[in-house]
Image (tube, grey):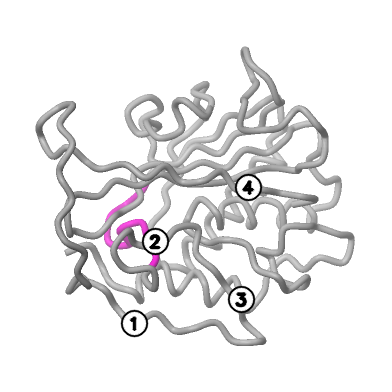
Amino acid sequence: MSGDTRARPRRTIAASAVAGALLALAIPVTPAYATTIPPSTRHAPYSYLATQPRNAKAPVRWDPCTVHRYKIVSGGTDATVRASLRAAVARLSKASGIPLVYAGITSVMPRRASAGTLPRAAGADIVLAFARPGSGRGRTDLLPSTNTLLGVGGAYYTWVGTKPAWFVSGYGVFDVRRVPRTAAGRTRMFEHEVGHALGLGHVGLPSDVMYPVQSSTSVTWSTGLAHGLLAVGRPAGCRA
């Protein structure tokens, strides 16, 4: 979004039930859980935020058969802006089949050091925040100090041995100083960053929602986004 860059997902090895224990990696194999994901086409490109550590063709996903709660950091926005964000989330949830349920307002701000632990800190799998860059109340270091970005989005996953990786924490952060004035602009921004939080990466087609630069002619929905949501959503299967 106007130079938008996604935060890199942190690759962690889950320690099972043993706190502080890292599991040794086994010899790489093609896991049995990997499913065939439909490829991008010229007219409907999409990419993944992260791919499986042991299968670069399969995306890391949220379990689409589990309800995922999300909360909003209001950042002083009005009810109209927040309603627009909730509508965008609902639209992506319906298109992907990933159940996303609004769980209210939170003061827990996603930051680099804590964005991977939002479920524990905020009581929600995903936090969508209106914020300013920097440190302190209402600010986050996920936004750069320059005013070139509308927002950033990302997700964190865990994995153990040869088992699949699954997202466990996600965020979308919007620079409250630069929220678009038009409803269409806001919708595009929200869909783009929530798209990242759900597991989608950037594409090179300017007319697609996941293109990294937003302009006055940017669409608020695209076939590429729809295809990408199917690839990371319910059609790709539930967590075994």
- Under circle 4, the secondary element is helix
Q: Earlier in the sequence, mark 3 or mark 4?
A: 4
What main secondary structure does the magenta stretch of the protein show? loop
Q: Which residue position is annotated with label 4? A: 85
- Mark toward the viewer: 3 or 4: 3
Indicate the secondary structure of the residue bearing disc 3: helix
Camera-side mark, 4 or 1? 1
Q: Which residue is mark 3?
A: 224
Q: Is residue 108 above or below residue 116?
A: above
Q: Quadrant of residue 144?
A: top right
Query: What is the three-letter code of the residue carrying label 4?
Result: Leu
Distance between mark 3 and mark 4 Cα atoms? 20 Å
Mark pair 1, 2: CA separation: 19 Å
Question: Does the magenta segment cover residue 63?
Answer: yes
Question: Callout 3, which amino acid?
Answer: Gly
Q: Nearer the viewer, residue 8 or 70?
A: 8
Cβ–Cβ under 8 Å for marks 3 and 2: no
Q: Residues within 10 Å of mark 3 (few under 14, many from 20)?
A: many
Q: Are marks 3 and 4 in contact (CB under 8 Å)?
A: no
Name the amino acid type tagged 2: Ile
